[in-house]
Image (cartoon, rainbow, N blue to C red):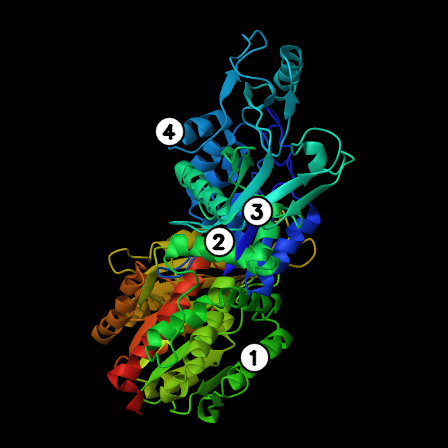
Amino acid sequence: MKVAVIYNRDSQSVINLFGMPNREKYGKQAIKRIVDSLKKYGHQVTALEGDKDLINNLEHFMPRVLKGERPGMAFNLSYGIQGQARYTHVPGILEMVGVPYVGSGPLAHSLALDKVVAKMIFIQNGVPTPPFAVLSNPDFESPDLTYPLIVKPKNEAVSMGIKVVNNEEELRKAAQVIFDKFNQPVLVERYIEGREINVGLLGNNPPETLPPCEMVFGSGGPAIYTIEDKKGKSGRTIEWLCPAPLTEEQTHQAQEIAKQAFTALGCYDTARVDMRLDAEGNFYVLEINSLPSLGEHGSYVIAAEKVGLDFPALINRIVEVASSRYFGTPTPPTIQAGEKDPQTLIFSFLTERRDRIEKRLEEWTHLSSRTSDPVGNTMAITQLDNRMQEMKMKLVKEFTDTRSAWTWETNAGFEGGTLFIGHIDVPLDSGVPVQPFRREPEWLHGEGIGVSRAPLVMLEFALRSLRYNRLLHQLPIGVLYYLDEGRDCRYSAEIIRAAASKAERVLVLRPGSPGDNVIVKRRGQRKYNLIIEGKPQRIGQQRKSPEVILWFSNKIAELSNLSSKKDRITLSVTDIKTSSFPMLLPHQVTATLVLSYNDAKLADGIEEQMRILFKQATFKWNLERISDRPPMKERRNSLQLSKPLASVAQKWEIALSEESSVVPSVAGLVPDDISVLCGIGPVSKDLYTPQEAVNRISLIQRTLLTAEFLAQDVTSGRNNKK
């Protein structure tokens, strides 16, 4: 499980600093000891300050989970930074954003910190507590209590401001210190002469009680535990006797009173009840610490050791009881040895590896392989080949030319099965800035992360989950990766067509669009290179023929008018370059024209009209079609293919839907009689820009969808088909 240890120590990262500051802090060594203990039991752990950056830091560490996936947990040690009811601040934030956490909730912490309210609740629930009074201001009337008395701030912890007084003069001096220093009412209660007994509690409904501990005070000063004692500045020695030397009946009585106090305030998981035992054998609850110290020499840790819980075991047990409270079991459900359900096995495999999946994605984004970078592409395809070999996928020489396309398959081959098609090259121009990998709470950024890297990582881990569960090589699966997406598949197109014709269904590894869509229809796209050339002319020279660039500028509007919304055909000029000699006007224009279309016959007609338009020119011109990406037509068999995928999505409450796109893909190369879906990769945004990003939850969702979609073939019998 992912566990975030949350504490307050150094950070003052708040919008404004005002109000009562926190005086309680965990030491660095104590925090490290807790972190190391959690790691010892196999948890993934980070330590975070409980400040205004907490939500963002938690989202980075434990992103949104799938349905059925156990979220991470916070191990709350936070005393707060400033203000009232500081113990409640971090639990309140965790409640709001939906992060499970160890320990009591905001209400119990608030009640425990308000010593007056806590004592009133104790009295209502029959929990013995010393008689008390509340002093609201320095002009208080002397309380009707018998001296000696003990005074303390109404809303503080760890013995801050505590003092024993023997007369009214001492009472007024001690109370004034609290009014001045803590700016809050003063709690006054009868001082109970006797023994100091602490009882730790662990668990819920009902909590277990640890052996009572007795605090033995050294000589000098009153027999109370002061802040100076806790900081080692009092000059006396404090020792713990555990178990406390009590009779069996007294031990039982102390533990039952502690349970009553714990239940009365609604505490969870852990607490420590401080009480006094007078000479007549009566117990009195002084307070309950809803956030008991886990310091190495504290009574809570000492008592736990007496029942066989060393420090790492105690910390892990606290996580277990909190986990039981949230999820109904002390530990995550285990997979039974005889369990055969592929979906359960796949889910467990993937959710346990979410960090590894994101780490692999980071590795891929660091490996640059733009279309124009042959070295980068060679390194990338070598890396991919290594991954495929790790999974015992075999290279298919028939559909591999080692220049533009590589194909691998399982032992069952892929004929009559499923073929995945993706591209390794990132189609970005050399002038586009490199985008390094970075995480945001909901998005992962990096070069080519949406168009290439995330779909690749998704497929790898989907296949790994099948192999881990001994399903992969039973299934007819092929993987084809090509290296010329940025060149409109000019060299790989024939291999893609031939390989797709052997499969029964093709899944194209393009990114899904926001809204959790897959693509069932795409427009085709043709690119043309246009060159118009005239005679060089001097600037200011009188001339009979127009300037080349002015003539073409006027023709752009006419080209645009060839577009037809009705026929869903669009013609655009996407790039214009000029050539000229020194001191002369441009004599040559080179332009790229892009034609987006659904119907090839209509596209042929537009192309003919383009040629007619340019024939009017008095210049030399040449119009060359440099690529043609066929449209992906909507097919009945493709719609049928999306149904089992949608069924898996519904199971995990993923809102998968179908849409069409104007952007072309290799799906248009798949023969019409083969079912095909495009855009099955993780949901992405800002494609082909320096802001390109993939949705974090979609990365694991689409991986799970892909793996379970393939695993359905095991039960349907499709794995026997070749």
Quarter-of-image position of residue 190: top right
- What residue would you read off at disc 3? 6
Residue at (30% x, 58% y) in the render? 655
What percent of the width, then of the height, locates residue 441? 50, 51
Q: In what element is the residue under mark 3?
A: strand
CA distance for labels 4 and 3:
34 Å
- Hey, which residue is sitting farthest left in the picture? 636
What percent of the width, then of the height, locates residue 43? 54, 62
Indicate which disc residue 381 carries. Answer: 1
Q: Is residue 494 visible?
A: no
Q: Nearer the viewer, mark 1 or mark 4?
A: 4
CA distance for labels 1 and 2:
39 Å
Q: In what element is the residue under mark 1?
A: helix
Residue type beneath disc 3: Ile
CA distance for labels 3 and 2:
10 Å
- What residue would you read off at disc 4? 124
Indicate which disc residue 73 carries. Answer: 2
Q: Is residue 99 visible?
A: yes
